[in-house]
Image (cartoon, rainbow, N blue to C red):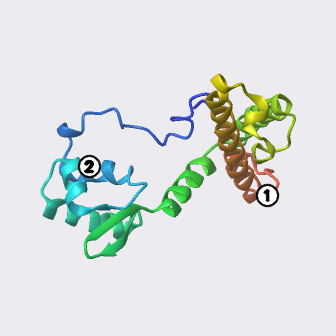
Amino acid sequence: MTVDDPAGAFGLAEGFNADLDAEPADERVYRVALQLYEAAGVSAIAERASCAPDTARRHLNRLADIGVVEPVSESPLTYVRNESYFEWRLRNRLEALSRDELHEMLADLTGREAAFRERFDAESPTDVNAFDHADYDDIEAVWLALSEWHTVRARIDRLEAVRRGRGSDSNPEENAA
């Protein structure tokens, strides 16, 4: 697990490269559901998952029952991914890290954050005016860096929450790899 690979740093993008058409309908609907950042209707989801709307509806109901998606409206029936579920899932994965892995990731991320603080001479990405740090041609690069800094900060916060939840980290068996 590396932090330099934002898409895979926490294993959230596992399996997205597989050919969806070769998967069973429930897996195709699930993979489409993982990408529902905006509400989508059953028909649109069925189309993206290459299945019948009734099949998509059945699988979406099951995914709603377990919390992966949540219905947004009933007429027409639309769903969106449940961000709380994914936050919970991510924290569970992070809690499975050994104490050493957790400290290593925190050290790497805090080092990256320190570099951002130095680069932008600010304590937080919200304190930075991108236009003060870029010419017209490279403003997008500054925005991308600030976005990455936000992501680094969010990852540090999650890891710190896991670390605090463990208390003193004094039980070597519990925190062993």
Q: Residues within 10 Å of mark 2 (few under 14, many from 20)?
A: some
Is residue 16 positioned above or below 69 on the image?
Answer: above
Which quadrant of the figure has residue 148? Answer: top right
* Mark positioned earlier in the residue sequence (2 or 1): 2
58 left or right, relative to 98: left
Query: Furthest residue to the bottom?
Result: 74
Mark 2: amino acid: Glu
Is residue 167 positioned above or below 111 on the image?
Answer: below
In the picture, the quarter occupied by the C terminus is top right
86 left or right, relative to 47: right
Is residue 49 positioned above or below 82 on the image?
Answer: above
Nearest the eye: 114 or 107: 114
Q: Residue at x 70, y 38 (%)?
A: 149
Judging by the rendered image, the residue that carries numbered circle 2 is 27
Q: Residue at x 72, y 55 (%)?
A: 161
Which quadrant of the figure has residue 111? Answer: top right
Mark 1: amino acid: Gly
Judging by the rendered image, the residue that carries numbered circle 1 is 167
Q: Residues within 10 Å of mark 1 (few under 14, many from 20)?
A: few
Q: Secondary structure at mark 1?
A: loop
